[in-house]
Amino acid sequence: MVRGKIEIKKIENVTSIQVTFSKRSGLFKKARELSVLCDAQVAAIVFSQNGRLYEFSSSEMEKTIERYGEFSNEYFVLGRPQVQPYLEELKKEMDIMVKKIDLLEVQQRKLMGQGLGSCSVAELQEIDIQIEKSLRIVRSRKEIKVLDERRRLREKEIRERLLRPLLPVTLHTEKGEPEGGYRTKHSSEVETDLFIGLPVARP
C-alpha cells in the first residue's frame, strides 16, 4: 500500500506538538544505530519548545562539538558553493544507511515470526534455514552450560565427601547422652537387662 505524503508544516495544536515531539526517541535510536553500524561519530542536540535539552552522542559530546568546530573552520573557508555538494553527498549516504537499518529491522521481525504474510516460499525457506542455524548454536551452548553445571556439582560432592571425616566428633548433650540418638555400650546393656528381667547382682 502506497503511503500518502504528509505535509510538513508547524503544528498548531499544543497536544499534537507534545505527542509528535515525544517521538524524538526515534531520532536518537537511528543515530545510535548509525554510530554502531558504521562506526561513525554521531551527535544529535534537540531543544524542546519549552527550552528543555535532549541530546545523544556516540562519544563525549564536547569532543564531537570540538571536532565539528575544527572541521567547520577549516572547511567553510573554501566557500559555501563547494560545501553544498559535500552536504548532499552526506545526505545520500545517510539515506542509504537508514534504508539498510529499516531492512535489518524488517528481517529481525521476520525471524521473530512477524510480518511473514508477504514472504515468498524461497524467503520462508531462507528464514527457516537461519532459524535452524540459530537453534543449533543455542542448543550447543546450552549443552556446554549443562555439562559445566554437572561438573561443578560433582566436584562439590567430592569435596564434601573428602571433608566429612575431618568434621569434629559429636559432642554429648547436657543429659550425658550423645547427640543424634546414639547410645553407649553400657547403656545398651542396662536396657537389655531391664527388658529381660530383674538385674543380677554384680560382684
Image (cartoon, helix red, strand yellow):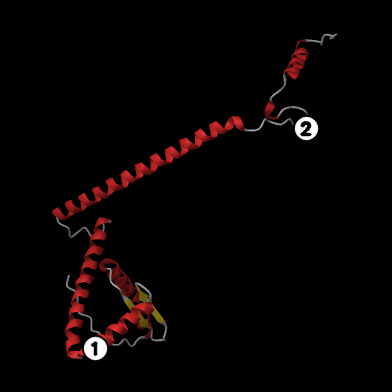
Q: Is residue 127 left or right of residue 22?
A: left
Under mark 2, the amino acid is: Glu
Residue 13 versus residue 125: which sits nearer the camera?
Answer: 125
> Is any atom of residue 153 visible in this view?
yes
Q: Position of residue 16 (x, y in %)?
A: 35, 82
Kind of element beneath mark 1: helix
Q: Is residue 180 left or right of residue 5?
A: right
User: Which image quarter is the C terminus in?
Assistant: top right
User: Which image quarter is the N terminus in?
Assistant: bottom left
Q: Position of residue 196 (x, y in %)?
A: 76, 10
Kind of element beneath mark 2: loop
Q: Which residue is mark 1?
A: 76
Q: Is residue 94 left or right of residue 167?
A: left
Asked whether the beta carbons under mark 2 and mark 1 sit within 8 Å of each other, the answer is no
Q: Is residue 22 above or below residue 74?
A: above
Q: How many marks?
A: 2
Q: Is residue 187 left or right of residue 14?
A: right
Q: Residue at x 77, y 12 (%)?
A: 193
Q: Residue at x 22, y 75 (%)?
A: 94
For label 1, the crowd category at 10 Å Cα-Cα, with few meaning under 14, some 14 to 19 and many 20 or more, is few
Q: Position of residue 195 (x, y in %)?
A: 75, 13
Q: Is residue 168 above or below residue 24?
A: above
**Residue 174's mark?**
2
**Residue 116's mark?**
none
Q: Residue at x 33, y 46 (%)?
A: 141
Q: Nearer the viewer, mark 2 or mark 1?
A: 1
Residue 76: image quadrant is bottom left
Q: Is residue 21 above or below residue 35?
A: below
Mark 2 or mark 1, which has the lower sequence index? 1
Under mark 1, the amino acid is: Phe
For label 2, the crowd category at 10 Å Cα-Cα, with few meaning under 14, some 14 to 19 and many 20 or more, is few
